[in-house]
């Protein structure tokens, strides 16, 4: 028994030693790869992807700053973060250029407690909510209404026979947001800045706010998907980066894609047929608050990810459709 324990102990020590040696070897490679990149150029590093991997191109010179041999790279925020080979992750400090490396540590933790499902009741209409959760709702609705808060009051998107409306807790539908919609999806920019992407039963499409004001009526991409945030996977769920689009939204279907500025309710990049825009990202010279605010947008430089399926590459463009690809 003692011999077995000793063998296990030496195995653990040896494994840890090998891991450290491997991490050190990858750190040496990363150090060499970034040796020629100065800190002042971090803000100009634009990721691009080829069949070989992901690299960096300089935003101004279009020169390749890092060959496309990495698994995934992010913009400077203001530190640089990346995934070397889907095993080793790294972060480069924007002040000192010190490099930290870590192993992937993805773990999913199930909740210890089962969340009780809301129960439909014989209410005439409406719902009961507390603590940002619906506990009971009228059985006239097809499903449990989708709860949200607006100006410290509870509201919900409710469905009756595939028709949608915004209701208060008493079940009263808001003016201009009654059960006249075949689709109604909420887009929250900040706490009390809310738009709904809608399609009426008559086929009209656009955006409407809580006051019933409509924008871009029949000027959106038909039957499109809306994406207003993304993420950059880094080490584990705790350390991964939530990428808020700061009021921009990617609108796309299988044929067209574009970018809407929800702060002005206008197209930043009008629908494109030849560009498949998939995401928004940005570079930041200083840290931005974890508590999202549209005001921080002026501190950031935004780019838009294009997936070129024909050439099996992806690259970024700016709002003027300028491509950030290496010079050929």
Image: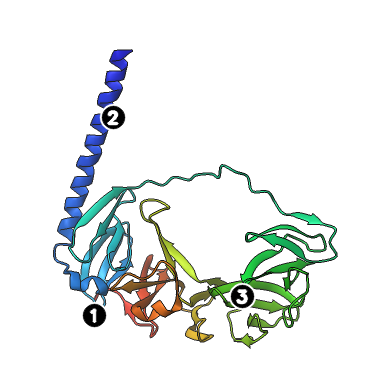
Q: Which mark is residue 151?
A: 3
Decide: few, some or many residues near mark 2? Use Cα within 10 Å; few <14, some 14-19, many ≥20.
few
Left or right placement of residue 244 versus residue 42 in this view: right
Left or right placement of residue 198 versus residue 180 in this view: left
Q: Element type at marker 3?
A: loop
Tag 2 or tag 3, which sits nearer the N-term? 2
Q: Quadrant of residue 121?
A: bottom right
Decide: few, some or many residues near mark 3? Use Cα within 10 Å; few <14, some 14-19, many ≥20.
few
Q: Position of residue 146 (x, y in %)?
A: 67, 64
Q: Position of residue 313 (x, y in %)?
A: 36, 66
| Residue that badge 2 annotates | 12
For the C terminus, give its image quadrant.
Answer: bottom left
Q: Is residue 303 above or below residue 104?
A: below
Front residue of 52/82: it is 82
Work out how far the residue at label 3 is from the one at label 2, CA to CA, in angstroms.
55 Å
Front residue of 271/99: it is 99
For the N terminus, give its image quadrant.
Answer: top left
Work out how far the residue at label 1 is from the one at label 2, CA to CA, in angstroms.
49 Å
Query: Residue at (72%, 79%) from the top-left corner?
Result: 177
Q: Which mark lies nearer to you, 1 or 3?
A: 3
Q: Is residue 70 visible?
A: yes
Contact, mark 3 vs mark 2 (Cβ under 8 Å)? no
Query: Residue at (66%, 77%) from the top-left corner?
Result: 198
Q: Which mark lies nearer to you, 1 or 2?
A: 2
């Amino acid at each position: 028994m003692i011999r077995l324990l000793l063998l296990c102990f030496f195995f653990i020590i040896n494994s840890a030693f090998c891991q450290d040696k491997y991490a050190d070897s990858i750190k040496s490679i990363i150090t060499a790869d970034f040796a020629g990149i100065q800190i002042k150029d971090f803000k100009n590093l634009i990721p691009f992807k080829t069949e070989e991997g992901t690299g960096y191109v300089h935003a101004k010179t279009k020169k390749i700053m890092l060959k496309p041999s990495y698994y995934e790279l992010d913009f400077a925020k203001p530190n640089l973060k990346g995934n070397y080979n889907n095993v080793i992750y790294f972060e480069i400090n924007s002040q000192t250029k010190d490099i930290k490396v870590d192993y992937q540590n993805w773990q999913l933790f199930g909740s210890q407690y089962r969340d009780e499902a809301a129960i439909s009741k014989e209410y005439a209409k409406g719902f009961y909510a507390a603590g940002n959760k619906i506990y009971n709702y009228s059985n006239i609705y097809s499903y449990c209404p989708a709860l949200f808060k607006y100006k410290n009051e509870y509201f919900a998107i409710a469905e009756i026979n595939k028709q949608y409306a915004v209701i208060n807790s008493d079940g009263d539908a808001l003016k201009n947001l009654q059960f006249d919609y075949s689709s109604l999806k909420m887009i929250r920019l900040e706490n009390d800045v809310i738009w709904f992407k809608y399609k009426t039963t008559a086929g009209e499409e656009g955006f409407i706010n809580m006051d019933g004001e409509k924008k871009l009526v029949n000027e959106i991409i038909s039957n499109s998907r809306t994406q207003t945030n993304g993420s950059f996977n880094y080490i584990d769920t705790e350390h991964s980066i939530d990428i808020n689009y700061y009021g921009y939204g990617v609108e796309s279907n299988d044929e067209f894609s574009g970018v809407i500025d929800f702060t002005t309710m206008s197209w930043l990049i009008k629908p494109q047929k030849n560009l498949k825009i998939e995401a928004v990202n940005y570079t930041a010279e200083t840290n931005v608050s974890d508590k999202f605010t549209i005001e921080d947008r002026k501190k950031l430089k935004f780019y838009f990810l294009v997936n070129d399926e024909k050439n099996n590459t992806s690259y970024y463009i700016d709002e003027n459709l300028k491509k950030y690809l290496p010079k050929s």
